Image (cartoon, rainbow, N blue to C red):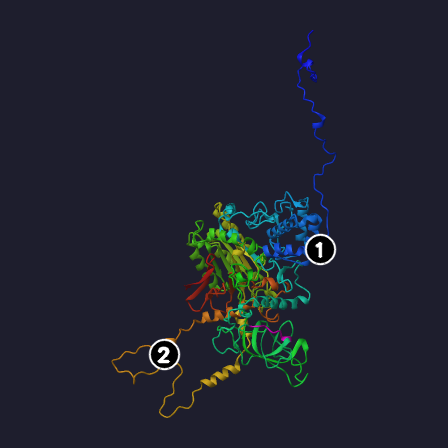
Amino acid sequence: MAIPEKLQENNPFSSSPAFGTPLHPIRDPAQRPPPPPAFKPQIATILPIILPPPTLRPLAFRIFTKKHNYTLTSSALQALASFVGRHCGSGWREEGTGEKVLEEVAKIWKAENGPVIVEDGDRLKTILNTLQGCMSGGKITNVKSGANLSRHSSFAFGNDSAVDLSDVNRRPELDRSGSSFGMSGLNVDSPAPEEHEELGKDPRSWLKVVSAFEQPRFTYDVDKKHFLALSSKPSMFPAPTHKTAIFKERYNIIHQRLLRNPAFQAPSLSAAQPVLSKRKKNSAVERQFYKITPIANLLGRGGTSHLILGMLVIAPTGTLAVTDLSGSITLDLQHALSMQDGEPYFCPGMIVLVDGVYEEDWAGAGSGGLGNTGGVGGTIGGRFVGFEIGGPPVEKRDLALGINLKAEDLGGGFGWTDFLGQGSERAVGSRMKRLEERMIGPDSETIEESRRKMVVISDVNLDQPTTLSALRKVLEEYSALDQPPMTFVLMGDFSSKAAMAGAGVGSIEYKEMFNELAAVLADFPALLRKSTWIFVPGDNDPWASSFSAGASTLLPREAVPDIFTSRIKRAFANAKSEGGPLKKDEVDGEAIWTSNPTRLSLFGPAHEMILCRDDISGRFRRNAVIIGQAARQAEEQEQIPTASVAGEDIVMSGALPSTESVLPEDSQMTELPDSPMHDAVPPEPFSVTEAKRLILSLLPQSTLSPFPLTVRPTHWDFTTSALSLYPLPHALVLADSEAPPFTLTFEGCHVMNPGRLVEGGGRRKKVQWIEYDAWIKRGIVKETYMG
């Protein structure tokens, strides 16, 4: 038998010769690769180090402060240094791993709308715990900008004001992914406004009514120069220290905004500086810039001029005084003039600027008694003679939030603070403005012009027989339109007398008033189905009226109780059932009973409106301090004409010169450039003058109640936020029945007063209200007559 060729070549046999299984060649042991190690580490080991915070400070400053405009506290820097040293090791600087960690922390902090001050709190610990699970070999791997954050927790909107994700199916500003106004707690890019189509095209879906008792509470921290959220639960019976904190809070807010005013900035290169006083004459002191002197620093500086910022108070001796956080001093305003041309009111409780001279008490210590040199309550000796007095300059909303600033402007930088719980200006402001322009702008194709209107009606006294007739006349005008207005605001007092206070209006009579109002509203089902109705109470409405008996009630005050409004709610339910289903993009009408004051948020921070029902002009007139008595007497003496020379006529004040003896009969009299006729300016209407006076008195105080608690009592724990006017809203409705109706804009804030719904007596009565355009943020006074 012959031997096969393969065997002759000494080739190895196959593992299965019968089946011809191919055999892998046997490699030379010298060329065989080494076997794998028994243990192969999957994660590079990092040797932790102790990283001192001062070593990390320059890098943290460059990333957090220079790049992201944040400020790190010492505790936060210590936490970051410990994290970087533990997870990045000695190569945190050479390999750049420490910079990437700090950058990622800053991005997640910004996505969560964290405050400007980065502190070592729960928010920072959550971020570091999230990154800890994504660290590998000192580097961040497999992280999608905070995607590992718990989706079951509430996502902060800014300054720890959280939004519950369980409400996502009911609130249109929250989408299914948990994003709030397009910004979620995850660091994911927000959708463009076009992606909100599924939320509806009705702008009422973006209208939110924020009650005074639901508004987030903040306090201004002087050391950190920022607003901090209050986590403590408010109480109707707080500690006595909360009472003094009200006035300290007001002073600190006004002081910090005042120091950013150009008139209080020291000149650098330009010699021309803004002037604080608006008067062109009678200026006490000419200076390039203003500097505030604390009252305690006046001691030992008698006869010198100073500018002080303080609150007008009535001293225990009954004299007028001014006080700040350092002390008090008696105030003399006999020679004082107003810094503003509008002649605002100056009442005790208001914070004012006084420019004058300090006069020391040379009679000896204690000779003046209480309030002079006794030192009671921090009162220093002597008196301060004021020559000019005025309210602190108002700061515009954009300057307070630090947005849209010019090169020479100094902003407050509070754009990341979510004052209403509807999203901060920095986080969602630009997106909401684009959404607002698309939905209610002039080029919007979704709604008509009438749909972006708000109707504001005040002093709806339902116990007056003419009120329901006037209200019916107003509603008939808007029911004739194809598209009704977006919102109807009805403000009290719904009773002209204090309800349930023994004034003839009991609980049964008060309920019957709203039953009659429900009968009138039921005649306009289209307005009930397609508009939002907001009801704001007054001082004569229950339950507060039961204890005040017609006097000023506590602010803020709760809404009208549900027991009186059941018939109106039934009218809305009947209008929905009888009208059938709405279109896809429409939202059902609703009746909202809210507090006084209250705030409206339309498209988040893009539009903020405050509604307040208060006869504040009469309170200003009753409590105003009389200033400038001696100055007016001096002016009157100067205007008395001297004895006339024989043959001369006494020139009457304001009379035009006679031209009969000078001009020939055929000549024509021409107006001289310097004649009184040329300089004559028509006087302003009384309503405009009173409106300017009211606005100049209220807005500089940054609060809706610049009075002592004995004049206008307030809830201590709700005063600083619910009654705050800082930053200024886009629109402010001051429903004052004692002031004429007006609409004026001051420093970007549009102030409106609807006045009384029915004005005048006799058979022909005037009906007046405000029609407000939500797009241009301006309102007009509407009038009609009945009878």
Q: Residue at x 70, y 50 (%)?
A: 85
Quadrant of the image containing the N terminus? top right
Q: Secondary structure at mark 1?
A: loop
Spot the residue most to the top: 1
Span shown in magenta: 290-296
* Residue 675: numbered disc: 2
Q: Main secondary structure of the magenta part?
A: loop
Residue to which mark 1 is pinned = 52
Judging depth in this view, the residue of 192 and 632 nearest the camera is 192
Report how far apart the C-alphas of labels 1 and 2 lie in the structure.
78 Å
Amino acid type, residue under disc 1 in the picture:
Pro
Instruction: Judge from the rendering whether residue 269 lies leftward or rightward of residue 82; answer left or right.
Output: left
Residue 292 highlighted magenta (yes or no): yes
x and y percent of residue 701 in the render?
A: 56, 68
Circle 2: is it few (<14), some (14-19), or many (20+) Cα within 10 Å?
Answer: few
* On screen, residue 622 above or below 599: below
Image label count:
2
